[in-house]
Amino acid sequence: MSTLNASLADLQSLFLRLAPVPGVSLQERLIANAIAALLKPAGITVIEDAAGTTLGGDAGNLICLPPHFDPAQPAMMLTAHLDTVESTAALTPVVHPDRITSGGDTILGGDCRLGLTVLCDLLLQSARGTAPLKNFFVLFTVAEEIGLLGAREFDASQYNISFAYVFDSSRRPGIYIKECVGLHLFDAAFHGKAAHAGVAPEEGINAIALAAAAIANVPFGRIDDDMTANIGAIRGGHATNVVPDLVTVEGEVRSFSPDRIREQMGIIERRMREGMNGVGTLSFSTRVDFEPYVLMDGMSFLTDLERALRTCGLTPNPIRYSGGSDANMYNAKGIKAVNLGTGAQKPHTKEEFFLLEDILAVAKIAYSLVEKS
Ligand SMILES: [Zn+2]
């Protein structure tokens, strides 16, 4: 029996209130203020950390503590992110009989304002104190869309976190990301030698030709079931009468194993050098965008999740997924975290939408996770 009650009318009006508040990455001040203005009068403690200052943004992560929160006890963390991939300032949400869309000229911001709405509603309901609840708090992060930066800056050592549920997958409710790829990036700079293309071409080393030979020697695309690789950008040369001296190439590798990503980066660099045949020079560097996570069967927080999903009439559906979320960052910090399907579909596009039945289902999942059984 649920004692927290999901109301579609409440969820809908809360979403319509929050969605048009602008908050692109590192400019989350207005949405952070809107959340604080919503929650504080209800008795929820809202703490803003220093991530804004550290990251050069105008707002920090919001840590929202319901009245019953006990810092001395282990706590469940529920999270969503404040930022949207584009501004929603000009958004005119359209409520259809079965769904909410944008007016067609902007994103809807369902990523992640749906998660934000559900967790704000959960906090407001929990502050009413009518239901016995587990120890939990909510974290709203900044700068998720530009590399999980807010989650990275969040000081988890301040809280006794057992595990985390992230409300940020575009898949339908019931689905959860049990295994998620990590993403590492590489930069390759091919250095040749400039020369006049007509007067002294033999004095030059053509960096475009170097890059072409190197790239032709490297496997890309779907490497196998567990790994993909891509070259996503190439820049170089500026005039037809100059032998170009520099070409830069950017790419990525995704896999479920950090060791395999590093191994593949080694292969890419080695094959590029082989392709160059001793001509010119290559500077090759890699960096971590986010690390993968693989959750094991039978972990208690997944068992709890599956129970909650079944309570809501959903069939638990664990999947492997190739896009990151704050869950990747929490797992990398040693906090077991899973990203849940919210049904905020077609994210980052003007066709973005969610079904009304899905926001209701996600709210029920959140309630079920925190209610004492
Ligand atoms: Zn998101």
Image: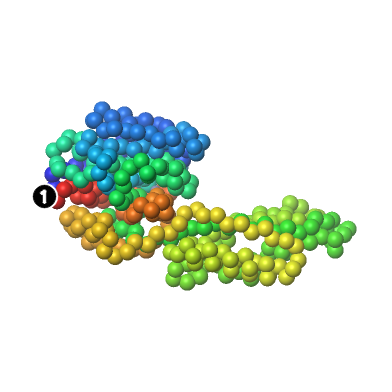
Callout 1: 10 Å neighbours few (<14), some, many (20+)? few
Instruction: Give the residue drawn at x 35%, y 45%.
Output: 80
Residue corresponding to mark 1:
1
Camera-nearest residue between 151 and 202? 151
Name the kind of residue labelled 1 in the image. Answer: Met
Q: Position of residue 107 (x, y in %)?
A: 41, 44
- Can residue 90 be seen here? The reply is no
Instruction: Give the residue drawn at x 26%, y 41%.
Output: 72
Q: Residue furthest right?
A: 199
305 sits left or right of 85 in the view:
left
Camera-nearest residue between 272 and 352? 272
Q: Position of residue 15 (x, y in %)?
A: 30, 39
User: Which quadrant of the structure image shows residue 192?
Assistant: bottom right
289 lies above or below 14: below
Q: Position of residue 132 (x, y in %)?
A: 15, 43
74 sits left or right of 256 in the view:
left
261 lies above or below 349: below
- Can residue 49 be seen here? The reply is yes
User: Which quadrant of the structure image shows residue 204?
Assistant: bottom right
Q: Position of residue 52 (x, y in %)?
A: 46, 35
Number of numbered callouts drawn? 1
Instruction: Give the residue drawn at x 28%, y 29%.
Output: 40
Q: Is mark 1 within 8 Å of ligand 1?
A: no
